[in-house]
Structure formats: structure tokens, C-alpha cells
Image (cartoon, helix red, strand yellow):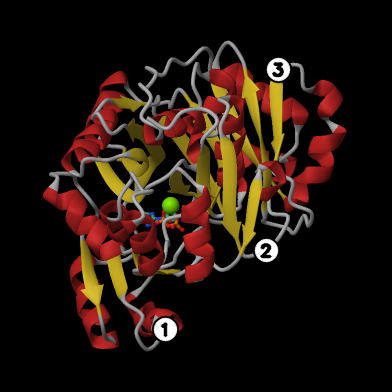
Amino acid sequence: MITPGQTIGILGGGQLGRMMALESKAMGYQIAVLEPVAGSPTAQVADIEIVGAYNDEEAVKQLAAVSDVVTFEFENVDANTATILQEAGKLPQGITLLKTTQHRLREKEALEEAGLTVAPYKAITSADELAAAIDVLGTPAVLKTCRGGYDGKGQYVIHSKEESDQAFQELYREGVELVVEGFVSFEKEISVIVTRNLKGELQTFPVAENIHEDNILKRTIVPARISVDAKKRAVQMAEAFAKSIELVGTLAVEMFYTTSGEIYVNELAPRPHNSGHYTMDSCNVSQFGQHVRAICDWPLVKPKLYHPVIMDNILGEHVEIAIKMIPEFTDAFLHLYGKSEARPGRKMGHLNITAPTVEEALERSLQLHIRTHTMEATQ
Ligand SMILES: Nc1ncnc2c1ncn2[C@@H]1O[C@H](COP(=O)(O)OP(=O)(O)O)[C@@H](O)[C@H]1O
Ligand SMILES: [Mg+2]
């Protein structure tokens, strides 16, 4: 067990690292962080700040040296960095899941191996291959880079056969691997966050319903407005996968729920996830607290949802109004990440709104009108 007083190292200095750090500090741990830019959201609440690139060997060795255990807040961890941490005996989460989730094709193969359903897909290396795949998959279809995509970046939705060449030109570069997927006309997007510790204890958080805007998560609603049976299946899928890969730490499973009740896995994140921020003010344990428990080999808590909640992301363009509305926040919890520059579209914080029912939480969110300009579209 890693005990309070010891040091947890975090690779990455963003908001996920910050929220991991805050939970860790509350439990009595010291925090070290490696991030290329000084004064990051995580460094602001850390004890030891190492400024360096994520793949800077010296910096990574330093992080390993000052830490008793190391975790990460993003999946694109450089292979050499992961190996250094692993060989130092500081990476209980291991390297395998990182490798799998860094690459959409490997991820889909792993999901299928575990018996889960993903959208039909095909690896693409040429414009001709893409055209042939579109003939089979039909349109719309989504062309994605295998590596490095996030918040809809590295993706192209192909609406007609004629667009196929353009999509390929847009995303293809020397050495860039691509995958094309059939479009899942989902009714809802949902996600499940599952945590497993070294002893193999496994817990899942309640299923979240997610609404995206411009490919960025806008809102999470919990409990998800799907049937009890669908929730059960979503949780079973996440748990089955977590067991099959012997997960240690946290895994977020993004899924599509269709009108006919089918569930497809969209993608995985081997870490706490934006769609789990709702846990912070509505559950007996947050996704960050549970994660710290898992990597420090504490027992896990069985998550319990105290009340319905909606989480609204606060992007650069919403910060001003969010701060102005603080006097109204009798049932809303504002989290800001300490980022100095509020660029439009940049994740600056989130607001958890709690209420006796989801409908009341949605109503309350309308009254607070922090994201007014698009609020109606998601009701
Ligand atoms: N095959 C698909 N069918 C339908 N919608 C999709 C598909 N792939 C992606 N999307 C939409 O695009 C969003 C972002 O895609 P995703 O694969 O999750 O990439 P990322 O979150 O890494 O940018 C999804 O949340 C979903 O709304
Ligand atoms: Mg996604």
C-alpha cells in the first residue's frame, strides 16, 4: 500500500491531474507533477513541480525518483516514458492499456476480443481503400486518425461518397494511420466509469448521459435517461472489459445507445474522464478519490449517488457569466481549474447542479443560463 505522507506523481498538469491531486492532498499524500509549462492547473496544488516535456528522459526519471507511485492524466504517454516508470516499479496501472487506448484500431480489436460491440470499421491506408470501405459501410461514415484525436479533432464525417477523397486528403499524412467507422445513429451517448485496484476489486459509477456540442462534452446528466435494463447492460459491458484486461486504476467507456436498445462502445479513456466530474458533488466517492484508492491499493468504495445531478462544462466563453452567477449557486457547485487564459472552447471548469430530479436540475440549469445560447437545443 502507498500510505498517506508518501508521494503520488502525476504525468500531466491539466485539470484531471489537478482534481486527482486535490483528492490525494485531502487523503494526506504529497503530489509531484511533470508538465512542460510552469504553473499548470496541477502544479498550483502540487508539492513538487517538475517542468519538462513528457518524453524528456531526465524529467521522467526525476518524477519516478521523487514519487512512490506514478499515474497519468492522459493516454498519449510516450512509450519510453511509460517504460522508464514501469521499470522503476512506479506504474501499477501498467503499460498495456495505455498502448491499447493510444490507437483506435488496437482499441477496437481489444473491445471485440472481450466480446463487446463496436461500430463496423476498417483500417485505411489509401484513398481507394477508403472509397471501397464507404461502399460497404455507407454514409455517413467517420474517418478518424488512429492516434492523437480528442474533442473531435482528427476526425472527418463523410456525408456522401463524393466526400471520401477530400476526407482522405484532409487527414492523411505520411505515417498517419486511419480508421473509418460506420456512423451509429445513436439516441443517446452514455459512459461508464469503472475502477479496479491491484487486488482485483472492481466498482462502477452510475451510467452517465452525455451531450456534446461541437464535439466537446457539453453536459452530463445522471441518472442517464435510459431504461434500467440498458443501464445494467452498459455497466456489465464496462465491467467485462475491465476484467478482461485486468484493469488497474480508472477506465472510462464511452458508448452509443441506439433507439432499438443496442449499445456500441465508441471509445475508451484509461483515466478519470470529463463525464465523471458529476461524481464530485453527488456521490459518496468521486472518480478521483476512487482512482487514488485504486493506485494506492486501498479498498474501493461502492459508489452511491446521493441525488440527481447535471454537470455543465464551463468553456472560455462561459467563465464570466459563471462567476457572475455565484450568488445563485445554492444547489450548484462551481469548479474552476486555475487556467489563466479563457480562450473560447477551452475547458476552464465545470458546474455540478444537484436537484431532487433530473428535470429539476435541467430547469435549474436553464435559470442559471450559463450556457444559454445553446441550452434549448439539448432539452
Ligand atoms: N461512428 C460514429 N457514429 C456516430 N457518431 C460518432 C461516431 N464516431 C464519433 N462520433 C461522434 O463524435 C464524437 C467524438 O468522437 P470520439 O470517437 O469520441 O472522439 P474524441 O472524443 O476522441 O474526439 C462522439 O462523441 C460522437 O458524438
Ligand atoms: Mg470521445
Horizontal side of 343 relative to 67 (left or right) equals right
Indicate which disc, 3 or 1, sits on the residue closer to the N terminus. Answer: 1
Task: For residue 349, say whether it is visible.
Answer: yes
Q: Amino acid at mark 3?
A: Asp
Give the residue at mark 2. Answer: 37
Establish if 237 lies above or below 37.
Answer: above
Which numbered tag is attached to residue 331? Answer: 3
Please tell me whether mark 1 sits on a helix, a strand or a loop. Answer: helix
Horizontal side of 125 relative to 337 (left or right) equals left
Q: Amino acid at mark 2?
A: Val
Please tell me whether mark 3 sits on a helix, a strand or a loop. Answer: loop
Horizontal side of 3 relative to 42 (left or right) equals left
- Dot 3 alpha-carbon crowd within 10 angstroms: few under 14, some 14 to 19, many 20 or more: few
Q: Amino acid at mark 1?
A: Gln
Which numbered tag is attached to residue 11? Answer: none
Which residue lies most toward the front here? 65
- Dot 2 alpha-carbon crowd within 10 angstroms: few under 14, some 14 to 19, many 20 or more: some
Mark 1 beta carbon near ligand 1 (under 8 Å): no
Image coordinates for residue 324, horizontal then vertical, percent: 87, 35
Quarter holding the N terminus is top left
Quarter holding the C terminus is top right
Q: Quadrant of residue 301?
A: top left
Image coordinates for residue 209, horizontal then vertical, percent: 45, 34
Establish if 164 lies above or below 244.
Answer: below
